[in-house]
Image (spheres, rainbow, N blue to C red):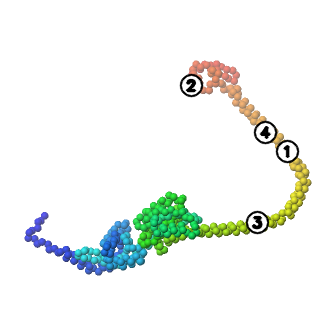
Amino acid sequence: MIQPSLFDQPPQGISLSEFNSRIERVLNGDASLFNQWVIAETSDLRLNRSGHCYTELIEKDSRGETVAKISAAIWAGNYSKLYHKFLNATGQVLATGMKVMVNVSVSYHRLFGMKVVINDIDPNYTMGDMARQRQEIINRLTQEGIIDMNKQLPWPEVPQRIAIISADGAAGYGDFMNQLHRNSYGLQFYTCLFNAVMQGAQTVPTVLAALDRINTHLELFDCVVIIRGGGATSELNSFDNYDLAANVAQFPLPVIVGIGHERDVTVLDSVAAMPVKTPTAAAEWLIQRGTDALAHLNELQEAVTTAVRETVGQAREQLAYFTSMIPAAARRILDTNRIRLDNNARAIPLAVTNLVSTQRTRLDRAAERVGEAVTRAMQREQQRLQALDDKATLLSPVNTLRRGYSLVMRDGKCVTSSDQLQPGDHINVQFAAGTADASVTTVTN
C-alpha cells in the first residue's frame, strides 16, 4: 500500500449545504417532476396534529411484491379540499390500501430533504378500480357457476324462523328487529342473532364464522338475514370479498342481504337470494311474505265459504225436490218390483228344470271322464310295475352269477376289495351252481 506523502495536495471538498444545493437545483429545476399524474397505492396513511397528511405511495407487481415506494405528503392547506373532493365523488374516506391517481410534484429542501407533495387527486380512477375489482369477483363467481345458486333455492311459503348476522347493538339491527316484531299484522317471527363485526378487517372472518354456526343448525331456520345499517361507503368494502360472496352463493338456506343505504351495492347483493337496500327493507320483505300468505288464506277462506253456501243451497233444493218426488217414486218402484217379482216367480220352475238338466248332463260327462282317467292310470301303473319287475330280475344276484361272476365271502361277509384279505384267510366262493372253500396264499393290492 502506497502511503500518501506529506507533501501531497489534499482533495478539495465542498460543504454539505453546497452539495444539497446542487441536488435542489437539479430536482427543483426539472419541469418533468412537477404536476405529474402518478398511479400508485396508498400505504400507512396518517394525519398529524397540524393537519398535514402523510403517506407512502407504493407500486406492486402481479405477485403483490412492492417494486417502488416513495414518501408523500398533502399539506394541511390542501388536505381539506382533497378530502371532501374524494369523499363526495366516491363516498369513501381516503385511506390506506386504495388505488389512486394523484398529481404530484417533487420538493427538495437542503435542510429537510426530498418530499413528494400531492397537489390533486382524481377520484374517478379510484372509483373505476373499485368497480373493476367488484366486477372481477362477479365474473369469477359466474365462471365457477355458483353466482345464482342461492337465488335458485326454494323459499318457504312464510319464512318465520330467521337467523340474523349482524352486530349486536347496531342501529341497523335495532331497526330490523323493531320493524319485524312490531308489525301491524300481528305476524310472529322467531329470530336468533349470530353476532359478527360488520366493518373493518374482522368483518369477513366473523361473518364466515357466523355462517358456519348457522350451517350446523340448518333444520332450525327458514332463511338467513345479513344486515348492516348505513355509514361511510368505505366501511362496506369488506362485503366485496370473494370468499364471503362464494360462501353466501353456496349457502344451503336462502339469504337476504340488507347492507348500507339505498345507493350502496356490494358483491353480496349479486349472489343473495333476496338483495334489499336496508335492514328495514329486509324486515318489510319478510312481513310482505307473511301478509301475502294471509291474503291468500283469506281468499281461500272466502272461496271455501262461498262454495259451502252454494253446495248447501243446492243440496236443500235437491232435498226439497226429492221430498216431493218420494211418494210417486215409491209407488213406481213398488209397481215395478211387483211386476219383476211375478215374472221371476213364473220363470223359477223353468229355470230350475233347465239348471237340473244341465247339471245332470255335466255330471254324466264327468263320470265318463273319471272312468276313462282311472283306466288310463291303471294301465300306466301296470306298465311301470312290469318295467320295474324286468329291471329287478335283470339286476338280481342270481342272474349276475349266471353271467360268470362269483361272490367271495369271509366270515359270512362279502369281500369287495383285496385290502380285506390277508394270506392264510379262509374264504368261501359262491358260483351260479355251487360253492367252493379256499385259502388265501397271496394278496396283491
- From the image, which quarter does the C terminus lie in? top right
In this view, the mark in front (1 or 3) = 3
Amino acid type shown at disc 3: Ala
Q: Bin the neighbour count of mark 1 within 10 Å (Cα to Cα): few under 14, some 14-19, many 20 and up.
A: few
Query: Which residue carries the number 1 mark?
Result: 363
Which element type, helix, strand or loop, lies under badge 2?
A: loop
Q: Residues within 10 Å of mark 4 (few under 14, many from 20)?
A: few
- Quarter of the image for residue 98 reads bottom left
> Which SS class for mark 3?
helix
- Which mark is on residue 377? 4
Q: Nearer the viewer, residue 29 or 97?
A: 97
Residue position marked by numbered label 2 in the rendering: 444
In the rendering, at what x and y percent does residue 368 appear?
A: 84, 42
Residue 118 sits above or below residue 428 on the image: below
Mark 2 neighbour class, 10 Å CA radius: few under 14, some 14 to 19, many 20 or more: few
At a point 83% along the width and 40% down the height, the residue shown is: 371
Q: Earlier in the sequence, mark 4 or mark 1?
A: 1
Is residue 142 visible in the rendered image? The answer is no
Mark 3 or mark 2: which is in front? 3
State the image quarter where residue 410 is shown. top right
Q: Nearer the viewer, residue 393 or 271?
A: 271
* Amino acid found under the numbered disc labelled 1: Leu
Question: Which amino acid lies under the numbered mark 4 shown in the image of this protein?
Answer: Ala
355 with respect to 214 (left or right): right
CA distance for labels 4 and 1: 21 Å
Numbered badge on residue 315: 3
